[in-house]
Image (tube, rainbow, N blue to C red):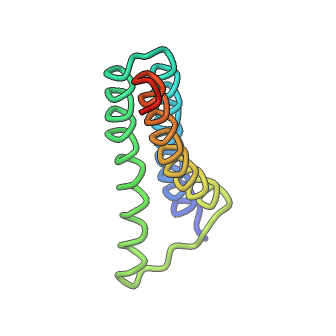
């Protein structure tokens, strides 16, 4: 792999990591707000996390489209880490939404 190609792939990997990491933090912050009874704030944090997450997702989707178009993307450890963080953020969001729903039910008296 040429140095220029490596640097470009590393930059894309860092974009993914930064965006999905921030989104994951927003999702966790949403749970903390729900725990305090601030369900409106929790929803805003989930929405903000989603808008940030999509930037990382688009960067990854561009690589997938590139490879689907016949241009090989040679994986580097940093890209593997970025993909792992992308999947982790998706999982964290799903779990956070469930926990927020539980806090809402508790606030309503368990109904």
Residue at position x 60%, y 69% in the image: 75
Q: Which one is in front, 109 or 69?
A: 109
Seen in the picture, residue 54 relative to 42 is either above or below; the reply is below
Residue 57 in the image, given as x and y percentages of width and height: 40, 54
Q: Which one is in front, 89 or 6?
A: 89
66 relative position to 88: left or right: left
Residue at position x 53%, y 39% in the image: 21
- Name the residue furthest bottom: 70
Residue at position x 50%, y 28% in the image: 31
User: How many labels sit on residues?
Assistant: 0
Q: Which one is in front, 15 or 6?
A: 15
> Where, quadrant-wise, is the C terminus in this rendering?
top left
80 relative position to 19: left or right: right
47 relative position to 77: left or right: left
Residue 18 in the image, given as x and y percentages of width and height: 51, 39
Residue at position x 49%, y 79% in the image: 72
Q: Which one is in front, 33 or 60?
A: 33
Give the quarter of the image for residue 76.
bottom right
Residue 53 in the image, given as x and y percentages of width and height: 40, 44
Residue 1 in the image, given as x and y percentages of width and height: 61, 71
């Amino acid at each position: 792999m040429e140095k220029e190609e490596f640097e470009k792939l590393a930059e894309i990997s860092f974009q993914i990591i930064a965006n999905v990491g921030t989104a994951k933090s927003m999702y966790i912050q949403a749970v903390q707000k729900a725990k305090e009874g601030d369900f409106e704030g929790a929803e805003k944090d989930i929405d903000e996390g989603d808008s940030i997450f999509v930037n990382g997702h688009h960067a990854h989707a561009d690589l997938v489209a590139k490879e689907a178009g016949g241009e090989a993307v040679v994986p580097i450890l940093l890209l593997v880490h970025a993909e792992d963080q992308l999947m982790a953020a998706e999982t964290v969001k799903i779990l956070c939404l469930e926990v927020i729903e539980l806090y809402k039910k508790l606030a309503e008296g368990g109904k």
